[in-house]
Image: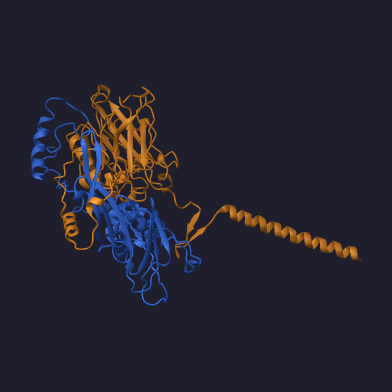
Chain colours: A blue, B orange
Amino acid sequence: MAEQEQQQAPAVEQEQPAPVEKKGFGRGGRGQRERREGGAPRQNRGPRRFGGEQEWTPLTKLGRLVKAGKIKSLETIFQFSIPIKEYQIVDHFLKNLKEEPLALGPVQKQTCAGQRTRFKAYVVVGDNHQHIGLGWKSAKEVQGAIKGAVINAKLNLIPVRKGYWGNKIAQPHTVPCKVTGKEGSVRVRLVPAPRGTGIVAAITSKKVLQMAGIQDCYTQSKGSTRTRSNFLKATFHALKETYNFLTPDLWGHTRLESTPFQEHSEYLAALK
Amino acid sequence: MNNKEEIVIGYLEQTDDILNIDDELPSYANGLPYFLENEDKFEPIKCQQCGNQMKMLLQIYAPLNKKHASFREIYVFLCLNEQCSKNNSSVRVFRMQSQQKPQLLQSKNKEYILSPQNKSFIIDTEIISAKENNNELQVAEELLPTNFDDEDKDVDLKNVKFDNENKIYENYLKSTEEKEDINELDGLEQDQQNNIDGCFLIYQHFLTQYPNHIVRYCFDSQSKPLWFSDKKQPQIDSKCPHCKKNKIFEFQINNSILTYFPELYNLEWGALYIYSCPSSCQVGGQILIEETIYAHSDEQEFISPNLKVDPNTKLVSINTNKSNKQKQQIQQQQQQQQIQQKIDEKDEEDDDW
């Protein structure tokens, strides 16, 4: 594909200067490729693939700091509520991220030329420990929808807080308190459970809770849980609430810390 | 964003000799500006906020098909002061033009150089057809979770590799876990994301497809710029002072220029958008005609300038002059009260006697 493009390109350029002398930035004089004496065509332009294989050049301040290794973990970004705009930041920190589609199906829209069918994918992204993200996308092909949904899920990543049901021995295994999330008419309530219970939930929310790293949980749901998009989002919102809940062990004073942008302002100023 | 015109994108290329090019006038970045007239005829260009002299980011040669603008050069200046960069007035753009081939006069003002350690770069160009541009846009809308995917489009997805996604899909179909029936998926088409910046994803897509391109030029009244973000998209209403027409978008300078010049790292903007008069009027007798430029940034100021960061402990303390004054006032009041009490006591003693 790329070779064909390159073969076509010089042919077009030779036609250009002769008939109409169109002036403009970059069009003056002879064609671009013959510009330099003995110059080879510029080698910046590689085969045009969609993202992925090319190296990530950051476009935001946060991206630059992450790529340079100045930010040690994702939790710093979460602590200061800095919006993550580039999904490569998440890839940089979490190398073992698993992506699982939960729902893949056709959706239709009525047009004057009949029905237009597209595929919609809901994908959950998580590391089975303490991060979870939910994303969705509809596109003409299933693979395209999955691709977009994965990117969406990475941009929507949240940390999940875990706690204990009873005695505080070994690692936290369940939700720290009763939390509830809602979307549309669906209400999902997560209740702490003793160790060894497992996840007591419907198939849809069970997958989400597993990938978030929660080992034991009771759930109660209400509303039209057949609408899977709302059910998934409600579970996701419930997990988001775990870090919004003020428990007594968080009552102590916290000191104000400087944001990563302030801390690394020397680096940002002149690449030290 | 369906452009009908071709789009010219510019890359930076290192070179030793700027003037050895095929174009009549140079287009390059970082160095002493080449003005078309003697620079003694106008004042050195200064920042409107802090008064320091601005540095030249780049100059491009952008001739038009009109007679009076057949040799037209555009200069972009910026102020490196951090405080100024939060404001839109830290960048300025000027246009110089002439009818006949002008003499190139290099400026002698060394303050104009942006990055003295780096050499100068030539701007090398590549033309993208409107069809290719539109296709890239549609590929981006199809595959990225932007919020603009409602219309029907013919997308050319030959260049996209779906290996990873195919694996995921096959695993999903093969998995023996309980799955709900696919036909029961509800037909919710309108599922919007609230916190995803769709424009930024498209911008990022273009920058990965044409890596490291700096300038994106499309001087057409119908053309729309490639915005950096959803937020703070401006409505540019400025008009040319001579012909009173609305200024139209000419070109934009992208964020990728930061990889070449580390002096720009602390600046807030993501892209610069230059708007100019469509008929390129010669305003009055001015040599340097100022045009409109917009520095697009999506950042909000989280920390107020009154917060101080202690470099040793990296803790933040709030330091306002007002509170100090208040403390001083309270102290003065207390002192006055004490003096008054002493006077009262003395009076009482006197009374006793």
Residue B293 sits in quarter: top left
| Residue at position x 26%, y 55% in the image | A123
Work out which quarter of the rendered image holds the C terminus of chain A and state it. bottom left
- Residue B38 visible in the current orientation: no
- Residue A60 visible in the current orientation: yes
Extreme residue in the right direction: B353
Residue B76 sits in quarter: top left
Give the tally of numbered discs. Answer: 0
Question: Residue A143, position in %: x, y?
Answer: 19, 51
Work out which quarter of the rendered image holds the N terminus of chain A and state it. top left
Question: Residue A58, position in %: x, y?
Answer: 28, 52
Question: For this view, does B38 lie left or right of residue B344?
Answer: left
Return the residue nearer the eye: B325 or B207: B207
Return the residue nearer the eye: A74 or B154: B154
Question: Residue A17, position in %: x, y?
Answer: 13, 29
Question: Residue A161, position in %: x, y?
Answer: 39, 65
| Residue at position x 31%, y 26% in the image | B280
Q: Is residue B246 above or below residue A84?
A: above
Q: In this view, does A147 lie above or below B243?
A: below
Return the residue nearer the eye: A159 or B305: A159
